[in-house]
Amino acid sequence: MKKSMGQKIFLAFNYAFLSLAGLLCLLPFINLLAVSLSSSSAVAAGSVSFVPKEFTLSSYQFVLHSSKFITAFFISLKRVLLGVGLNMILMICTAYPLSKGKKQLFAKPVYTWYFVITMLIGGGLIPTYLVIVKLRLIDTIWSLVLPGALPVYNMIILMNFFKSTPEELEEAAQIDGAGVWTTLWKVVLPISKPGLATVALFCIVSHWNSWFDGLIYMNNPRHYPLQSYLQTLVINPEQMLRISGGDYTKILAMVNARTGRAAQLFLGALPILMVYPFLQKYFSGGLLMGSVKG
Amino acid sequence: MKKKNMAEKLKRQLPLHLMLLPGVIFTFLFAYIPLYGIIIAFEDYNPLMGFSSPWVGLKHFRYVFGLPGFVNTIRNTLYIAVCKMAGGIVVPVTFALLLNEVANKTYKRGLQTLIYLPNFLSWVIVAGLLLDILSADGIVNTVLGFAGIEPIFFLGDKTWFPIVMILSDIWKGFGFGTVVYLAALTGIDPTLYEAAKVDGAKRWKQTLYITLPGIAPTVILMSVLSLGNVLNAGFDQIYNLYSPLVYETGDIIDTFVYRLGIEQAQYSPAAAVGIFKSGVSFVLIVLAYYLADKLADYHIF
Amino acid sequence: MRNKIAEKMLAFALTGALLGSLAGCGNSGAAASDAGEAGTQNAVENAEEKAEGQAEAVSGKEEEDGPYGRYPETVTLTRAQMTCAATQWENGDDETNNPWTRTALEEFNIRLEDAWAADGSQYAEKINLSIASQTLPDVFWVNANQFKQVTELGLVADLTQVYEQYASDTLKGIMDSDREAFESGKIDGKLMGISTQHFGVISQMNCVWIRDDWMQKLNLKAPETLEDVYEICRQFTQNDPDGNGVDDTYGLAVDKSLGSLYALMNSYHAYPKIWLNKEDGQIEYGVIQSEVRNALEAFQGLYTEGILSKEFAVADNAKMTEDLVSGKVGVAIWGSSFGYAPGIDVIKNNGEEAIFKSYALPSADAEAVKLAIDWPVGNYVVVNKNCQNPEAAIKMINLYTRVTNEGTAEEYNAFKNNERDWGAIPFQVQNPMADYNQYVEISAVQDSRDTSGLTPDQLGKYEHVIDWIDNKNPDSVGQYSQVSREGAYGVMKPFVDNEQYVRTAYKGVSTPTMVEKMSSLDAMRDEVFTKIIMGEDIGAFDEFVESWNSLGGEDITGEMNELYGN
């Protein structure tokens, strides 16, 4: 099929515009990367754009030299593993029964409203803090993992996904004598992989990105997960440089608040950048089934 | 007979109810027990007395509404949130339409991946990024400098601050919307286009008469669902970027509550603002789901 | 509870009443021993033996009790720690095991436990959460606003008695050297919090810094009047003081924050950044006074003459500093720290002759200059009212002040260097006379070089002063410019001695409108003043006063009068 001149021009513009938009999403990160790989003097002179000037790894050396970043990184990792594991178990266990009809689940609307209402109203920060204190979770990893153990929004996405799976398979399994658990484990979950991947990605991202609860519930900066630690740096980038002497002298000559912060931000974003492409392929499909088709 | 039936039914259902139990317990512990704390908004909360502090009725509601800047805060919240919502619909729809015209699958997929990416980064990271690129010697001001424009103090300027908040939020989130609308576009019946071509309709006419109506339900749905966020102007974003210099235009309800409750330890007034916000949001969300049901025949449960 | 009993017991012991058996648990404090009555002692001891249930309470005190008394049994004291990223511990120490914690255990038998630790930026928030959840530790810091709150809520202990009994003479001296600050820790006559004090009014003062080699080159004499200072600025601007034949110098260093001009306004008896107690008893913000208008008119003239940088309105602090270092400008209005930064870089870049010398800020007229002093107290040490041993907190403060003010050089190094004194929070109390005394002591022995009477912190600075005098080491110019006989503190000392300063009426507790609007009002102030200095009609000042009032200033003033007024 031949394209008219007008269409060709439109397509050319379209490609140009879209590519520009794509660049707009990428360039800030390239700039950040360039800043993190440049010397402090080049950055201070404002001459760094998208290519590192006076290339140096000092900022990364500096960041990885301090145990704080590494410690925080592993706390975050632990949090994601524990948190997402718990999220998945609770979401599956909640979403599956709720995906059944009213006939199959007694008091279904009560259950549904019970969970949904918590998305609409909350007791606020202080009462929640009091509960965490009373349960003696303060300053433990559980204070970051348990309060959000059942993410209702994601659970609903998963529930809608379960609803869309063919009923016949389950019925067939049940006729074969499989119980509810077996059906769920052997039949429903295997065909729900895209949906599970979708909510898993959401949960990973949400746990990895949470920063506020760490600041509030942890009793020592050494117990902060990575994003909470990064938050204190974003607010006050100079403080990390108030370290002197010893091994730092040489490194510090090439680092300033901006390059150091850029390196930390980039390292903080890296895990998401790495996981994202793998889960992304499941992703559009799962999201669509879950949230839009209802 | 009927009773026995019922009992049997329940017995058969028992595993399902057991399955729900952990979720019910966790939700009760961490979402319902804290609701009890709402009463501190109606008390002069004294930590020593806890929830049995003296009852003062609506005193704190009157107090916060009389506070300097509170009305301002509501205005900022509405302005920032509504602009974000509007931009959050127009931009992704446009992108989805344009991206739909692209025939090259790899390009399409790659671009989607790219624009979806900022959505997955925390506001801490994005705030750090913005602080860097918008600083006086950051890349944005360097580029403006080439055009002969004096450096702009984006995050410390009353006029610029809300604009930066709105644009950066759209930037961070438009990839998500685009993916959703793109998926909706693929759901449009291709025979409609075939028929239109037979009728000799031009491409943009097809867009106008087939594509747009085709994704309209999704657009309406997404807009309605975002209605509940009218009072959520983005705490994570603004908290990490604002300063007292921009309170006048940048302070929103959530940051206001945070400062009142956590920085100034005015627990009761902060709880009052929280309830006010919850109340308004509740009404809006119920309205939104009602509308979603009527307009798009969508119900989440 | 315990505290009250201790009080009672003390009273009994002093009057010699033999009521030990009644007291149940005794405080055989220093006062009791002083009473010298064996009967009292025995009675107390008997009581101790009997009072099984209160064994722990009894054992908390010992015969030799006083500022440095040791507990016979270990007392645990929980605290809220403030950490600093820059703290570097030695020999594998950390924030829970270091010279401070070990000394507390060895000397007092106090085991310090961190209830929590937070960075300075999170500390106040954590305190507020602890208040709300009733999980406050035994000892913690509060800022002025929180102090008001915890005392109103009745969460903290009355320290009047334990302070009287246990505060060391050094600590009492420190408190007495700024009574106003100390008294701010009292509510209705009761001492509820120990002010952490400050580095003294002298550390807040500003003076005129003039580049000495330029003075010599142009044959200028030391300024006595404000007009003299301006004349020097004028000469520096017009007569090529660096002798490079290019008209590239100017007189007075100013950046867009206008900080140095606000300091210079004191010469015009204007105090644009503090709250003034007026004669009629009202409190008013200094920025709306007509004296500010006069000063602005004068500054407008300076700008027209080219004495200020043409670009000051866009110059940040770094740019202004760069001009000083690179030899573009020769006069600055600055605090006593000028010699450290940018002073060191100035010398490194321009040679030892380029040293800036300090001169007293002169008056614009016949009336003597008074310097503006901000509210200096940041925090109060408070003790949880449920704390079993409130006096333990006082003992820890005694330890901090002893190490800081009287310790040996080794102690000083082990406890305080490399930001290790953060480990003593919340027991840190500064000596408002420390800087003042540094000047007095160091300048006195500058010639004799007899260092026997110097304390460790003084000795540290003294060595730098000598290093500059003998070797002209640029890294030592900061101390020399500050505490030597020729230093800025010498210029400022008369201002302290003659009380030539104005203290703000604000005492750390902010009002609601202040929290909300002060920053934007300040931003508006800087904006309008910048425009006026750059040539806008001075009538803009009157409009500014009007807007200042209508945009929240009037409300803040009302709230201030309600809060602090008489």
Image (cartoon, rainbow, N blue to C red):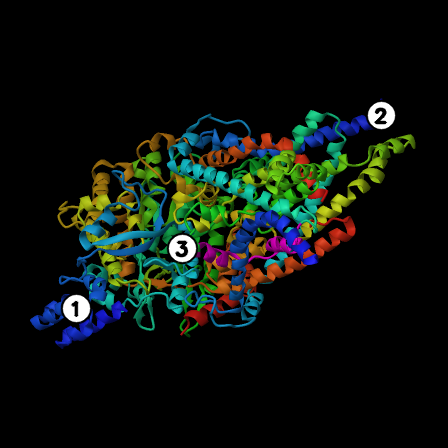
Residues in magenta? A105-134
Q: Which residue is mark 2?
A: A4
- Callout 1 touching callout 2 (CB < 8 Å): no
Q: Earlier in the sequence, mark 1 or mark 3?
A: 1
Q: Nearer the viewer, mark 2 or mark 3?
A: 2
Q: Is residue B262 left or right of residue B77?
A: left
- Callout 1 touching callout 3 (CB < 8 Å): no
Extreme-top residue of the structure: A2
Circle 1 residues within 10 Å: few <14, some 14–19, many ≥20: some
Q: Which residue is mark 3?
A: C263
Dots 1 and 3 on the same chain: yes
Whether residue C37 can be seen here? no
Please name the amino acid that badge 3 sits on: Ala
Residues C182 and B193: in front is B193
Q: Is residue A159 magenta?
A: no
Residue C316 x/y as whole percent: 47, 44
Query: Which chain is mark 1 on?
Result: C
